Image: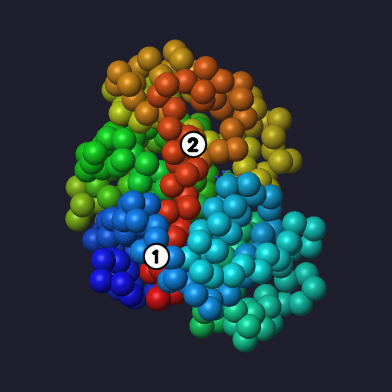
Amino acid sequence: MTATMLAAPILLTHDLLTGAEWNPPQTRELLHLAADIKAHPGRYASILRGKFIALIFEKPSLRTRVTFEVGIQSMGGSVIFLDHTQARLGERECISDVARNLERWVHGIVARVYEQRVLEELAAHTEIPVINALSDKYHPCQALADFMTIEEKAGSLRGFKLAYVGDGNNVCNSLIFLAARLGVHLRIATPGAYEPAREVLQEAKRVARETRAKIELFTDPREAVDGAQGVYTDAWTSMGFEAEGDVRENVFRAYQVNAELMSLAAPEALFLHCLPAHRSHEVTSEVLDGPQSVVLDQSENRMYVQKAILHTLFS
Ligand code: CP
Ligand code: NVA
């Protein structure tokens, strides 16, 4: 470690499976580390020297794959990409055997899976760190990058009023866990049957008592967005839910983020989206490409939070 490099936060777990592994100070420290890596990438250029990391993807990806590959290689590590988009993990041999083989060769696993239980099973059968690169339930790397972006733009996260509009999905669950840890005021508007997971809300509310974060649920998007400093949306139909696509188009129609909805937010409120975006569905091009949109900063920051995660889990 060079004299000027920041030390990684000390953790009790060596996996990142949900985003709830870290307590509020550790989460803050991780964002601080990500900002330092962004400002001084050269100081962290050898952190992963000699380390091999397997990337297992059951679903397509642009941002997650590229930011992990570039991030790992720019810290001196090597990547082995295992394309599982044609055959799911566990089909050719059981997941525990995959995990126990991989740990004989590589130092860590980054996995994008259909089912959260696959990540849990990988982690249960190996000593090496496992990182969630998106599951049906969570997308922690995304939410960390989102809050890093908000902090850069707004200066502070404490009490920041963020509206999430649309499906109570993996991205929404992770925003809830992280908002609770970072003292954010999160206002979520979903149709009744598409609320975020109950156990996620319960855990977040426990943490929120310590951080004074606020997590509120609405069904009316206008109510959630009223006076918000940031407005976030995501796909109405996530990967793996394509069979419900037509039903979802109808259910979510009133949840589109357009200029009219944005006009209810605070002046110059940020617009956020994890991408990929579906133009004219959950968001109009006018908003996505407009001056309030920070979606490309979110994408860029994926790399820095992931480098901070790797530094934390692998050093
Ligand atoms: N936001 C995100 O995870 O993008 P990809 O699906 O392209 O990786
Ligand atoms: N909720 C979306 C996020 C894509 C990055 C999905 O799971 O498809």
Give the alpha-carbon distance from disc 1 to disc 2, as whole Å: 23 Å
- Residue 173 appears in the rendering: no
Amino acid tagged 1: Tyr
The tag earlier along the polypeptide, 1 or 2, is: 1
Residue at 59% over, 33% down? 277
Q: Does the residue labelled 2 lie within 8 Å of ligand 1?
A: no
Residue at the disc numbered 2: 296
- In the rendered structure, the answer to whether residue 141 lies left or right of residue 97 reads left
Q: Which quarter of the figure is the N terminus placed in?
A: bottom left
- In the picture, residue 100 is in which quadrant? bottom right
Q: Residues within 10 Å of mark 2 (few under 14, many from 20)?
A: some
Number of marks in the rendered image: 2
Q: Choose top left, top right, bottom left or bottom right for residue 92.
A: bottom right
Which x, y percent locates residue 274? 51, 40
Residue picked out by circle 1: 44
In the rendered structure, which amino acid carries the disc numbered 2? Answer: Leu
Q: Can residue 212 be seen in this view?
A: yes
Which image quadrant: the C terminus?
Answer: bottom left
**Residue 171 in the image: x percent, y percent?**
49, 46
Is 98 or 36 nearer to us in this picture? 36
Q: Where is residue 77 in the image (x, y as percent from the top left)?
A: 54, 70
User: Residue 61 location in percent, x, y?
Assistant: 64, 49
SS for callout 2: helix
